[in-house]
Image (cartoon, rainbow, N blue to C red):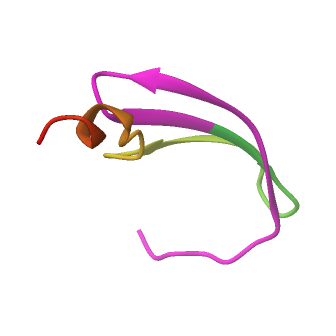
């Protein structure tokens, strides 16, 4: 699927698995959408050295 550029407003993020997030956002063109953001929650990797 090709990438699209649009004005967005993030409504909420939900944790999914260990480091992934589900992002719910609102766009002008397509309305309300949900997408997955892989490895977006990097808090768990900061202290594992």
Left or right: 1 in relation to 5: left
Q: Residue furthest left?
A: 49
Residue at 30% over, 21% down:
17
Please tell me how many numbered marks the rendered image carries.
0
Q: Quadrant of the N terminus?
A: bottom left
**Taking 4 as reference, is 41 above or below it?**
above
Q: Quadrant of the C terminus?
A: top left
Residue at 38% over, 36% down:
43
Left or right: 11 in relation to 16: right
Magenta stretch bounds? 1-23
Residue 16 x %, y %:
39, 23
Q: Is residue 6 magenta?
A: yes
Residue 11 x %, y %:
78, 36
Left or right: 41 in relation to 8: left
- Rendered image quadrant of residue 20: top left
Of residues 16 and 46, the one nearer the viewer is: 46
Q: Is residue 7 magenta?
A: yes
Residue 31 x %, y %:
82, 48
Left or right: 21 in relation to 10: left
Residue 7 x %, y %:
82, 68
Of residues 21 and 32, the one nearer the viewer is: 21
**Taking 17 as reference, is 6 above or below it?**
below
Residue at 29% over, 42% down:
46
Residue at 31% over, 34% down:
19
């Amino acid at each position: 699927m090709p990438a699209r550029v649009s004005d967005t407003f993030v409504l909420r993020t939900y944790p999914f698995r260990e480091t992934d997030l589900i992002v719910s956002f609102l766009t002008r063109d397509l309305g309300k959408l949900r997408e997955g953001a892989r490895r977006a929650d990097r808090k768990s990797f900061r202290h594992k050295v």
